[in-house]
Amino acid sequence: ASAALVAGLLTTSIATPASAAAALSDVIPAPVTVQPAAGVTYTLPSGASVYTAPGSSAAAAVGTYLAALLRRSTGYAVPVADAPAGTPTSGISLLLTGADASVGAEGYQLDVTAATVVIRAQTAAGLFHGVQTLRQLLPAQVEAATVQSVAWTVAGGRIIDYPRYAYRGAMLDTARHFFPVATVKAYLDQLALYKINYLHLHLSDDQGWRIVVDSWSRLATYGGSTQVGGGAGGYYTKAQYSDIVAYAASRQITIVPEIDMPGHTNAALASYAELNCNGVAPALYTGTDVGFSTLCTSKAVTYTFVQNVLSELAALTPGPYLHIGGDEASATTPAQYSTFMNQVQPMVTNLGKSVMGWHQITGANASAGRVMQFWGTGTTDAAVVSAAAAGAKVVMSPANKAYLDMKYNTSTPLGLSWAGYIEVQTAYEWNPGAYLANLPAASVLGVEAPMWSETLTTLDNIEFMAFPRLPALAELGWSPWSTHNWTAFKTRLGAQGPRWTIMGIDFYRSTQVPWA
Ligand code: TNX
């Protein structure tokens, strides 16, 4: 009976329209231009090769990534080889020549004919993004971990595509609840599918310190020993952090580490008595209040501490930003705050990095290359506008639109609601380039979707809050505003459902979305 059932399932999967090619425009984020070739399709043959730009190990790495993905579900050998000279005549080619000039540093051109799939870009990042588009154009079964019997068909035509914003981020709070390396990697894989290129890791807060600092070793071993609710917590060794950085890089994602200060520091204050103005270490904290802790801004040792922490973190971090937090510093006066930040910001630039901070960092001096992360719930902020006029860039994370830890509605079992309920349409219907009054569009560096973890403990929890809102925010970060259309988006979003099911992603089946 079970053999018959399996045979029946196989027959069904070959015959159903589910295995028919997606339309060339069925991609999230929406591409810049899509030109379908009517009636043309490419079907991956069992002997197909992936060919990559000769002489480029970075292109070869993208080819190896694509081939590994294809082998799992097709069962084909999919060898990876240098592309022969001349126009490709078969297989899937990843080339670093001949792309339309508009694709820039991160974009790609995808050409699908009956004989070939050719992705052209100027960089490996562009090729990788083109591969993510190809992935979505293949049948959803391409995401399966076991061999599937489907026709691996892709709609014919040309896509030319590149991002609206250079910064398309997500954030994971590893401090309120600690997440092991495998969870971070799984989330990185999910982010890559939607062309997210920064993962901001919130590595310290009142409830836990999550990264080893050799010069202040109790931060991790004691400060990392608990979490919200009193569980065991945890921390990343330097080797584990570097492993995350490298894994992210292989997905064209840059890690932005955050050490939140001067507030949100109870875990550090509990680990070292001398960091407290009264010289007394508080107890570890496992609740969810905010705004009660601060480093002692008047003590010299505080600045030695910050310098040591940032130096060790910078040495581990190839990306351009060190995020220094700066939010909800309610236990410091504005004067103490600016005194502190005016000493800390130059430490970051002297380490060769740019400052990133929550937008309250406008309370301190300008700093070259500074990025302010706007997390307000209103649409005006004079301090952010004037800091932008002085040269700072803004990453948009309005809490009532972009916060992935807000509940979808009153019956969402996880999450918080202080910034409101955020259904999928709410997450999608705002324009990052025109959201903050009087902020010039050119000051917006991009979008980030933060995931605070007071209520989240597992990968399933993360997935349930991220899907389907993360793809909505990814589209705001990548796609030109001219493509923005909720009605079209929700249909494309619904078509992702079977893909997530196959990938084992636990998602919220919003009634706003016509799920396929
Ligand atoms: C506000 S947003 C915070 C975090 C909380 C979050 C919960 C921000 C910069 N600070 O400390 O975790 O709300 O949604």
Image (spheres, grey):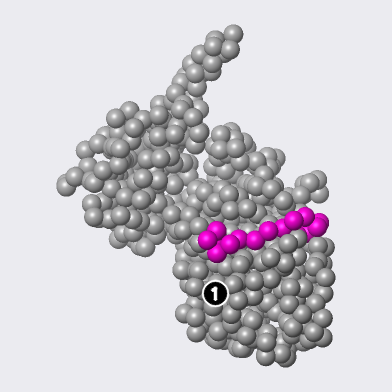
- Judging depth in this view, the residue of 506 and 267 nearest the camera is 267
| Rendered residue at 30%/55% (across/down) | 57
The quadrant where residue 300 appears = bottom right
Judge the density around disc 1: few (<14), some (14-19), many (≥20) Cα neighbours within 10 Å.
some
Residue 325 appears in the rendering = no
Q: Is residue 226 above or below residue 48?
A: below
At horizontal 64% and vertical 75% (from top left) the residue drawn is 216
Compared across the picture, whether 28 is left or right of 218 comes to left
Give above or below for 143 relative to 124. above
Q: Residue 429 at x, y = what percent? A: 62, 56
Residue 92 screen position, x and y as percent: 31, 40
If the image is split into quadrants, where does the N terminus sit? Answer: top right
In the figure, is residue 409 to the left or right of 386? right
Q: Position of residue 122 (x, y in %)?
A: 31, 59
* 140 horizontally vs 173: left or right: left
Looking at the picture, tell me which residue is in the foreground, 215 or 89: 215
Specify the farthest residue to the left: 85
Q: What residue sits 64% from the left and 81% below the top?
A: 305
Q: How many numbered marks, from 0 up?
A: 1
The three-letter amino acid code for the residue at tag 1 is Glu
Q: Is residue 289 above or below residue 406?
A: below
**Would residue 316 be found to the left or right of residue 412 on screen?**
left
In percent of width and height, residue 456 lies at 72, 52
Residue 419 in which image quadrant: bottom right
Mark 1, secondary structure of its residue:
helix
- Of the pair 271 and 126, the residue shown nearer to us: 271
Tell me if residue 221 can be seen.
yes
Q: Quadrant of the C terminus?
A: top right
Query: Which residue bears the numbered disc 1?
Result: 312
Q: Is residue 229 magenta?
A: yes
The stretch of residues the image draws in magenta is 227-241
